[in-house]
Every structure is written in C-alpha cells, then in structure tokens.
Image (cartoon, coloured by chain):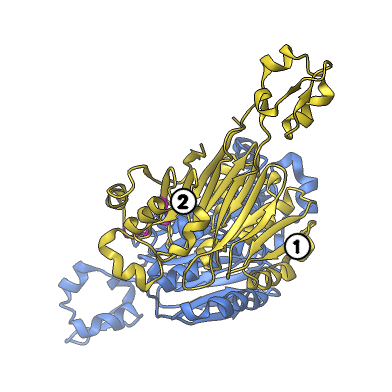
Chain colours: A yellow, B blue
Amino acid sequence: MIPFTVTILGSSSALPTSRRFPTSQVVTLNNQPYLIDCGEGTQIQLRKYKARIGKLNQIFISHLHGDHIFGLPGLLSTMSLLGRKTDLHIYAHSPLQEILDCHTAFFRSEMDFRVVFHPLNFKRPQVIFENKKIKVESFPLKHRVPCCGFRFSEQPKLPHLRKDKLEEFDIPLKERVKIKEGSDFTLPDGRIIPHKELTLPAGKPRSYAFCTDTIYHEPAIDSIQGADLLYHEATFANDMVDWAHKTYHSTAGEAATMAQKAAAKKLILGHFSARYYDIEPIVNDARSIFPETYAAEDGATFEIL
Amino acid sequence: MIPFTVTILGSSSALPTSRRFPTSQVVTLNNQPYLIDCGEGTQIQLRKYKARIGKLNQIFISHLHGDHIFGLPGLLSTMSLLGRKTDLHIYAHSPLQEILDCHTAFFRSEMDFRVVFHPLNFKRPQVIFENKKIKVESFPLKHRVPCCGFRFSEQPKLPHLRKDKLEEFDIPLKERVKIKEGSDFTLPDGRIIPHKELTLPAGKPRSYAFCTDTIYHEPAIDSIQGADLLYHEATFANDMVDWAHKTYHSTAGEAATMAQKAAAKKLILGHFSARYYDIEPIVNDARSIFPETYAAEDGATFEIL
C-alpha cells in the first residue's frame, strides 16, 4: 500500500509548552508532503522530524489565530534561503494575504518564489485542491474567527488486473488499461469475458480529516464521515465544558462524539490546553465514548489505514 | 555577588537547525531578565529554560532580519494570554514598529498592554536604557541592514562600609549613607576620620557585550572595551572569510581578534551557519587567537564575572 501518514509537528493550544509546539502537521501521501497550519516553530519541527521542506507546495491554514500562523514568515524565509523557485500555494482566510504582504514588503528582496494565495470558503464544503493522487476538501467549523477543517482523500484507484486471468486469456498490453477502466475483453473466438471476472477491486480510498479549532459542530459530520483517521481538537477535558463552549473549543468527550457519529475508524486528539501537564484525563474522557482514541504528541507519525 | 548571567536561547544563523534555534538571549541581573533579539521559537525556549516571561519588560533587537525578530508576534501574543498589563519596551530599528502594527491591527483585540517603541541610533553609541542597577548601551555594527550591538553594564556601586570601623567609631545609621557617598566622618571630639579609612571599594561593575550580526568592525571596539563577557557572531570558520565578507558576517578568527583588541575577559561565539554540524573548527580558529573562547549552545548559561 502506498504510504499515507500524518506527522504531528505541534499539539499545543494557544500557549505552547516546553513539550508541545503550536499546531502544525504534515500529511504525506507517497512521499509528497502537505502542511496543515503553521504555528511558531514549524520550520524547526519540520527539520527535526525530517520532513522535506523543499517538496512542500501546499499549505492549508485552518484559521488566523497566531498559534496557527506565526511560523509562516520563518518558513517562507527559509524556503527562500534554500533556493526555492517554484510557486507555493497557501489556502487560508483572505486577511492572511495582507499579513504576509506586510512581511514580504519588508523582506521582499529575499524571496525568489511566488506565493499563490487561495481564499477559503467558510460557508460550505469545497474541493480546494486535487491532483491524480489526492483530493483536499475544506469544510466550515465553528470558532471565534472563521475556521475550516480539511479532509485529505486518496483519489479512487482503478481496479487491479488479476494476474491469473491475464495469463489464462493471454490479454495483450494494449487492452489492459481499457479493462482497468471498465471494459470487458473479447477473445479472438468472439467470447466476451466480463470485466468483473478479470479484476479485483482497488482498496477503498483512504482519508484523513482535520478538525481544529472548533466548538462541537455537528454540521461537520458529513464532511468527516467515514474518515480512516480523524484529528479533532480536545483543548479541554469534559469537566471544563463551560469554558470550552465560551472559548469555542471542544472537550475530549465532544471530540469522541464527533468521531463516533461520523463513524471514523480512529481518533487523534490534540490542541491541548497548557494547563494539562498530564493529558491522560483528556484521553480517558474520549475513550469512554470512542475507544480507538489516541493523543497527538509532537513528532508522532500516524498511519492512515 | 549579585548573579549576572546570560542564557543562550538560540545560536543558529538564518537557517535554524534541529539543535539550534534562531538568535535570542536572556541577560539576567539580580533576577531581572532582559531579552536580546527574538528569533522564531523564542517563547518556547524561554519556557524551556525557565525564564520568567512575565518579568520581561525590555526587548533589545539588534536588526530586522527575520531570524532575529520572527518570534516577536508569538511572544507578544503569549504575554497577552498570560494577562500582561504592564508596558513592554522594544528597542529596535524603526520599521519594526510598522511590521508589529500590521500584526496588532489584526490581533489587536487580544493585547491588553502597551508596546512602547524606542528607535535605535545607528550612527553612534547611545545609552538606551538605565535604572539603578543596570545600564544598556547600543553601538553601531556593520551588516547588510542597520544593526546595533548592545552592552549591558552594572551601574557603579557605592563602596562598602568597613564593619570593624563602624563598630570602632560607633558610626550612627544616619551617617552611613553619606560616608558611602564619599563624606568623611567627624567624631564627637572633632577628629575627622577620612572616608578612605572607613570603606572598601565596591567590585568593578561587570559588563556583557553582544555583537551580532556584523562584518569585522573595529569602530565597535571602544564600546566593547574591557567587557567581562563578549558574545560575537562567528557565522563562519576562517576558511570562509570571503563569503563572510560578502554577506557582512564575521569569521571565528575575526571575532577572536575583536575580543583580543577589546581586552575582553571571555568570548562566546554564536550565530553558526547551518553548514557546520560540528562547530569545533570554528572554536579552534578563535582559540588560536583568543584562548578564552567558548561556543554558545542553546540552553547554556554563562556567568558574567
């Protein structure tokens, strides 16, 4: 199976700690990295956890709170120092462009590549990026400022040709792509071998959904339905539900409830408040509802299976 | 002796590495911290090395390259989240105010304290801050953009009263301050006891000088003369002198020469280029000229003696 992973670069909430950097993650499909959020220190974490900065072409920013964007100027500067020439695509709320322009106005002479800005839609889900391998969708969350979650889905794959049938019917090369794409095969004597007999279904496309920062928000369930891996913020344990709601964050129980209702396969919690040195209470709160719950730790890599 | 130290928070040059953050240091005199530069990740390093963010009231910024300032937005944001109300004084090249204004315009609602901006003088040395304990001077360096070094000096202390003489002459409390300030003491019988007989000289005021980023620049020697501890950038080893000059940086040998000519007591090298995994060649280049040379490491604390 083609490797499909997410590496946590930062799992703190607004106040980083000595053990957790602010939010940032690298999703990697078949060695192509995609960056989600860029809190302060992201470039340091990218280097520490051996992500390939030069291969990053897309950065997806959930919302414009400092702990999700303060690493951008440094990362762009480093990309420039490393000789980047290719476009960098940033998907974010429009005002980020103004904030970045302020920096580049001052540091412009140092940047040899173009930043291509893609404003996000905070009203409805949208496909924001796709190529032959991956599709990235944004969907609205509910926070104190406009915020989107993201879903990274493998593109559906063509079925596999059955090797035994290829040999049995001596199927020439030039027919094989058509069969993969759905055609039947006609033997020299006129007999038609149905497509289904010649192929095995491709694996179900895998997907990873990222939900932060947000209050409990059921409208997002459609967009995260059936995700193989779901990351959902759990800034607080259940006993702080009132404060969570006041600050438009989620409790662990609420994150777990989202995972359960969306029939996700596995849940990672993150964006932990700095008040928790030990996040076991948070994980336990979630596991009582959704057993397949794990905690994000800086540097941890999770497979999307 | 009152503790007077400098803690290195970051010792990389423009490209941070997994072992070195961008430039930042905390000078602490008698438990009062002062921040020099604020590269990305400074707030994380402050927390990791247990500096008291809440007690920081002055930040001195040498120049406006990203690796010296990209940590400011995050630090200011964190200070606000921690409930700061007191003024924060930033000493830097004027355009920083505009860059910060851009951030605060967007994040303004979150800041409950005032940032008081003090533009630096890049033409001549200047006292930029002082109180009863410490004096901070800036002095021009020579880099690709306007840049200042800083010297932190203890204020001269009053001499100590000799305890044996206090007892011998039964000197009342109300006379003691005057004697410390230089007065002689008149006994009840009219005899005058000279000031010098009653006091011991105070220790020589200690000082720390910080020089980065800069090409070799002898005019700075006056300002760093006799420093007990000198930090001087040594981005490159001696064999890269041409590139050092082209980029307005210094070699280790040049840093050591500055230390020697300024009769500093001890030299710390820092701002190492990312090309050096092992900085021993840099330290050796310097030690051949100035033996009391040490390398900055993130987290290291040096006493200023």
Q: Residue at x 40, y 54 (%)?
A: A261
Q: Is residue A102 visible in this depiction of the protein?
A: yes
- Extent of the magenta region: A269-275
Instruction: Find residue A281 and report its horizontal and vertical position in percent.
Output: 27, 51
Q: Chain of mark 2?
A: A
Cα distance in 3D space between marks 2 and 1? 44 Å
**Mark 2 secondary-structure assignment:** strand
Q: Amino acid at mark 2?
A: Tyr
Residue at the spot of label 1: B144
The image shows residue A174 at horizontal and vertical percentages of 84, 25
Question: In the visual, does B45 lie left or right of B72?
Answer: left
Query: Left or right: where does residue B6 sit relative to residue B283?
Result: left
Q: Is residue B182 magenta?
A: no
Quick one: label 2, few (<14), some, or many (20+) residues within 10 Å?
Answer: many
Instruction: Kindly identify the residue that appears in the image at 19 percent across and 73 percent down.
Output: B166
- Mark 1: which secondary structure? loop
For residue B170, side relative to residue B128 (left or right): left
Q: Nearer the viewer, residue A93 or A161?
A: A161
Front residue (pair A44, B183):
A44
Question: Label 1 is found on which chain of the structure?
Answer: B
Q: Quadrant of residue A272?
A: bottom left
The residue most toward the front is A190
**A52 to the left or right of A7:** right
Numbered circle sitting on residue B255: none
Q: Which residue is mark 2?
A: A231
Tell me where residue A37 appears, x and y as whole percent.
56, 57
